[in-house]
Image (cartoon, helix red, strand yellow):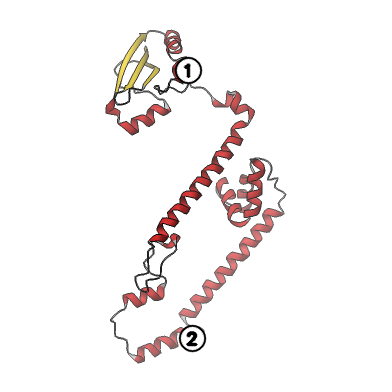
Amino acid sequence: MHYLVYKITNNITGKIYIGAHKTENINDGYGGSGTVLKRAYKKYGRENFKKEILSVFDNPEDMWDTEALLVNEEFVADKDTYNICTGGQRGSLDIRNTEYHQSGRHKANYIKAAKMGNEVQAEKRLKRIGTYNLNPTVCLHCDAPFEYDKRKNRFCNSSCAASHNNTGRVVSDAHREKVSKSLSKPDGVHQRRLKGQHDRKVEKEMLKERQKKEVLSSGIDFSKPGWTIKVAKLLGFPARVMGSEWMRANLPDLHEEICFKRT
């Protein structure tokens, strides 16, 4: 087994990365596992990087000690390096054992970052809507402009679609009368379809109201972590994210209050 300390150089920017690697084949083509380095590979292309073997050892201790000597705090702080932590770690560092993670600050930062991300996305969406409104998509039949969320539609409704697609079609008065009578029949297909749509809409609204009552009377402590899982289980959703999404859509005031308190 060989224990290597290697250097990878970006031929375009000159930035470097130093790492340690154990292998049975010195020329195995290993290119490092650094997160920032992998992003650079995607940006500049693997072919624009050069790898050099700095040292080869027969034991891991010398390898780690050499890496620690080269990749010190000053090296990591240099803007021309891809390393984000000092060398000599002797394996992957478990983030759960760090003071930052154990202090709980990561939770507050995660919530803050998520909130900032939502705000940025909302701002970008408003800009896209503003740009779209300057030249909106219009109905192919009546030229009525579509809202941003319906910009990919071709027609306003089924009536416009039918009128557009049936242009030039000759329909006799007898046929028109027959269709009119068919649509107006109480037990006709059209009336049954409309009744079914109405019944499903009413049933859906009733289900939402029952779900709201169940959540509000469940006694779930929304001030403690894990409330999304409890909401999801209560409503029979398959994933905890569904609990948060349901709260945002159906109880927006409560959801906003929870997120505000947690920040």
Residue designated by label 1: 86
- The circle drawn on residue 185 is 2
Q: Please tell me which residue is depicted at 70% across the width and 54% down the height of the picture.
A: 216
User: Residue 58's x, y, as percent?
Assistant: 38, 7
Q: Is residue 40 above or below residue 87?
A: below
Rendered position, 200 above or below 217: below
What is the secondary structure assignment of the residue under circle 2?
loop
**Camera-nearest residue between 55 and 203:** 55
Label 1 – label 2 distance at C-alpha: 80 Å
The percent coordinates of residue 88 (x first, y second) are: 47, 14
Question: Taking 6 as reference, is 115 left or right?
Answer: right
- Outermost bottom residue: 174
> Can the viewer see residue 25 in this picture?
no
Q: How many marks?
A: 2
Say which residue appears at 32% left-offset and 86% top-offset.
171
Q: Amino acid at mark 1?
A: Thr
Q: Nearer the viewer, residue 92 or 203?
A: 92
